Amino acid sequence: MADVKTPIKVEISHRTIIFTLFVLLALWFLIQIREIIVLIFLSLILLSALLRPVEWLSSKRVPRVLAVLIVYLIVIGLISAAVGIVVPPLIKQTSDFVSKLPQIISTVNQFVVFYNLPAENLSSALQDQFQQIAGNVISISSAIISSIFLIITLFVLTFYLLLEWKNFVRILSSPFSGKHEKKVVSIISKIEGGLGIWVRGQLTLSIIVGVLTYVGLRIIGIPFALPLALIAAILEIIPIIGPIISAIPAILVGLTISPVIGLAVAALFLIVQQLENNLIVPIVMSRVVGLQPPFVIIALLIGAKLAGIGGAFLAVPVIVVAKIIISELINEDQKFAEGISED
C-alpha cells in the first residue's frame, strides 16, 4: 500500500502579516514622495559643495548666518558673471544667424548643386530643421522657467541645512546610542565628504570640457569662442542633453561664416562629447568614486535608462553614498566577527 503524503501546512503569523503590510506601506509612501526625496538629495549635494567654505568662515569667528550669506553671495555673483559673459554674445550671434539664414541656405544649395548631391527641397528641409531646433529651445526654456520654484526651494532648504547642519546630524543620530550613534555620525560625515569630492570632480569635468571646446573653437576660427566654451562648461553638469544644447549656438555661429565651418564645429563638439563619455568622465569619476571606469559607464547608462537625464546626473552620487554605507556596514561586521573570534 502506497504511503499517503501528509499535506504541508504553512502557517503565517499575524506578526509576519503586519510586518509585510508595513513594508509595502513604507514602499508606497516612499514612491509617493520620491520627488521630495530627490530634492533633499540634491540639497545634500549642494550642501556638500558649500559646507567647507561656510565652516572655514565660521572658524574665523564669522557668525554662522553671515558666513552662509557670504558664500551664497559669492555663488550668486559667479552665476551672474557667467550669465553676463554668455548672454550678450549669444543674443548677438543669434540675431546675426537669423539675418544671414537666407544666405546660408543659398550657399548650401549651391554646394549641393555643384557636387551633384541628391537633395530634394533642401531649403524647406533646412527650414523645418531650424524650426524644430527653435521649438526645442522654446520647450527647454519653458521647462527652465517652470523649474525656478524648485531651484528657489532647493537653495532655501540648503540655506537652513547649512545653518543647522550640526543640529541636523544630531537629530538623525539621536535614536541611536553609544557606538552606534558615533557610527551614524561618521557615516553622515563621510557621505557629506564623498559628495563634496564628487562636486569637485564635476567641476573638474566642466573645466576640462570648457578648455577643450575653447581651444577647438579658436583653432577653427569661431568668434565668441570664450562665451561658447563657457556655455559648454556650464551645461556639462547636465548629462546627455547638455553637450547637445551647448553645441547649438556654436554651430549657428559657424553657419553664419560658412556651411563647412558649421560642419567643422559640429564635428568638434562630437569629438569632445565622445572623449567626455568614453575617456574623461570614466577616468575622473572613477578616481572620485573609487570604481573602475567600466562600472562608472554602466552606472551612467543604468541611471539614464531608469530616470533619463536626472538619473544619469544622480547615478554617480548615488554610488558614492551606497559605497560609503556598504563599506561602513561591512567594516562593522568584520569588527564584530573579529571580536567574537578573539573571545
Image: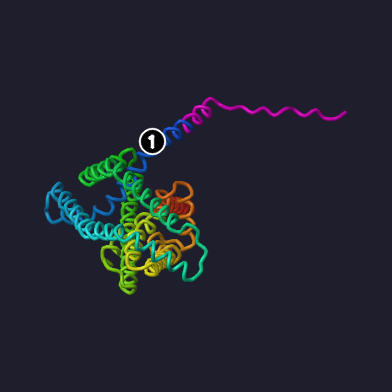
Viewer-proximal residue among 177 and 12? 12
Viewer-proximal residue among 162 and 298? 298
Residue 111 visible to an observer of this rendering: yes
Q: Quadrant of the N terminus?
A: top right
* Rendering quarter of residue 108: bottom left
Q: Residue reaching furthest top?
A: 14
Viewer-proximal residue among 1 and 162? 162
Q: Position of residue 155 (x, y in %)?
A: 24, 45
Residue 166 visible to an observer of this rendering: no
Q: What is the magenta range?
A: 1-23
Q: Position of residue 69 (x, y in %)?
A: 15, 49
* Rendering quarter of residue 284: bottom left
Mark 1: secondary structure: loop
Q: Residue reaching furthest bottom?
A: 219
Tag 1: Cα neighbours inside 10 Å, few (<14), some, or many (≥20)? few
Q: Position of residue 317 (x, y in %)?
A: 38, 53
Report whether 287 appears left or right of 87. right
- What residue sits right under mark 1 in the picture? 33
Viewer-proximal residue among 160 and 2? 160
Q: Is residue 21 part of the magenta span, yes or no?
A: yes
How was the colour assigned to the protein in this rendering? rainbow
Disc tally is 1
Report whether 20 appears left or right of 191. right
Residue 58 position (above or below residue 7)? below
Q: Is residue 171 part of the magenta span, yes or no?
A: no
Report whether 229 appears left or right of 17. left
Q: Position of residue 102 (x, y in %)?
A: 35, 60
**What amino acid type is highlighted by mark number 1?**
Ile
